[in-house]
Amino acid sequence: MTHRRHQRASVSICATKDTHMGFSTKAIHAAIEPDPTTGSIMTPIHLTSTYVQEELGKNKGYEYARVSNPTRTVLERQIAALEGGKEGLAFGSGMAAITTLFATLKSGDHVILSRNVYGGTYRLGKLVLSNFGIDCQFVDTTDLDNIRKAIKPKTAMVFVETPTNPTMEITDLSGVAKICKQKKLLSVVDNTFATPYLQNPLSLGIDLVLHSATKYLNGHSDMLGGLIVANDPKVIEQLRFLQKSLGGIMSPFEAWMCLRGIKTLSVRMDRHNRNAIQVASFLSKNTKVKKVNFPGLVSHPQHRLAKKQMKEFGGMISFDLGSLDKAKAFLKRVKLCALAESLGGVETLISHPATMTHASIPREERNRIGVTDGLVRISVGIEDVEDILDDLRNALRGI
Ligand SMILES: *Cc1c(COP(=O)(O)O)cnc(C)c1O
């Protein structure tokens, strides 16, 4: 009886693996099957470094845990399903994923990146990859002409972030995909801010999507992780080879945490988005706030493009208070909003990009890309929005 019930359960869950099912259903069921040995509905955490082989050359598909781990495999399949790609790969952090991606390049290659990518990506390009002869050029990708103009004979990849961190600039993903196809360049999108719930770059023709799973995918500020999803078998093979060769893999425990977080992604994102719309509208009416960057505001220069390529606008906002002193005073006065780096957790986090996430960018360059001394970034959490608004109102009153 138990046995038959178990069989029925696995059949029904397998049936829901239909690719036509809705996002929320996929986030709970895609790639997730009851453990065949116990029926455990949750994916077990396989804490092992190696796997016993029956005889030479005969194993159950697993040989050594740097190469593959069953818990990690489930997450890799799940993110592939959510992004609509063939295969996923999981890494120890977003930066480990990005580093592995860049290791597909050769000395002499040229890469075009969005001018305000994540600070760590900028640092990797400017201070690390430059030592290996990889030439990273940062351009304003909101204007596709800047990408076209930057292409050189040695250009191999176009790497964009949209919305960008922290100024919330939007890049036209279909446009980038078209240029890259024409010029035979690998197109990459860091989809961390949007998540697969709000934006699916692969469906717009982009070759490869990556995430810092540390943020919205996990969603609870309690792990670090990175994910890549790709479609081209050649690219996948190269990334798999580099994943085991460089070794920056995600641990089974983190993979499990991430799987757990993803189940509630759509519910959390709807709330992040709803709260962010209210916070952005509140900030844009406050006279102490000079400028609000949020793609959901009609005043955002690319609101229409954001509306076209995103389902909702996400939970990230940045706003300018005019000076470092004012930003400092404001950040000292917030109580509910936690002053911290990172984003995408259930709790509201607030930060100062110029001295925190983007400190490795020279001041002149920062000002040019809009990361001014007065800029504050807020990752709007899923608390009661009135409490967030009260906290911001109080803090603004004091400056
Ligand atoms: C945080 C972040 C990263 C880096 O991810 P880690 O998990 O911190 O290594 C990359 N891109 C974006 C957009 C991020 O927000």
Image (cartoon, rainbow, N blue to C red):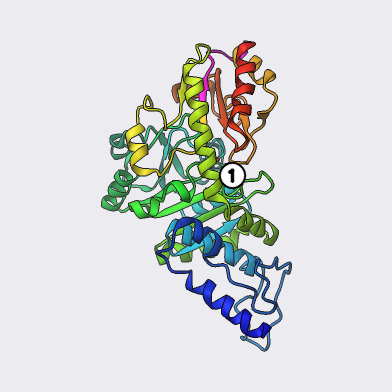
Residue 127 position within the rendered picture, expressed as x and y whole percent measured from the top left:
56, 37
Q: Position of residue 107 (x, y in %)?
A: 46, 50
Task: Please identify the quarter of the rendering in which residue 334 is found.
Answer: top right
Task: Please identify the quarter of the rendering in which residue 68 is found.
Answer: bottom right
Q: Quarter of the picture for ligand 1? A: top right
Would residue 178 be visible to someone looking at this image? yes
Classed neighbour count for the residue bearing mark 1: other residues with Cα under 10 Å, few (<14), some (14–19), many (≥20): many
Residue that badge 1 annotates: 215
Q: How many numbered discs?
A: 1
Horizontal arrangement in the rendering, residue 61 relative to residue 106 (left or right): right
Q: Amino acid at mark 1?
A: Lys
Name the outermost residue toward the left.
182
Q: Is residue 370 left or right of residue 142?
A: right
**Which image quadrant: the N terminus?**
bottom right
Which is nearer the eye, 385 or 116? 385
Asked if disc 1 is less than 8 Å from ligand 1, the answer is yes
Q: Nearer the viewer, residue 361 or 10?
A: 10
Please check the rendered image and state whether residue 359 is part of the magenta-colored stretch, yes or no.
no
What is the x, y in percent for residue 284? 47, 20
The stretch of residues the image draws in magenta is: 318-325
Residue at the spot x=54%, y=24% of the render? 362
Looking at the image, which residue is at 47% across and 58% down?
A: 82
Residue 320 counted in the magenta span = yes
Q: Residue 55 sits in which quadrant?
A: bottom right
Q: Please, is residue 146 above or below residue 241 in the view?
A: above
SS assignment at label 1: loop
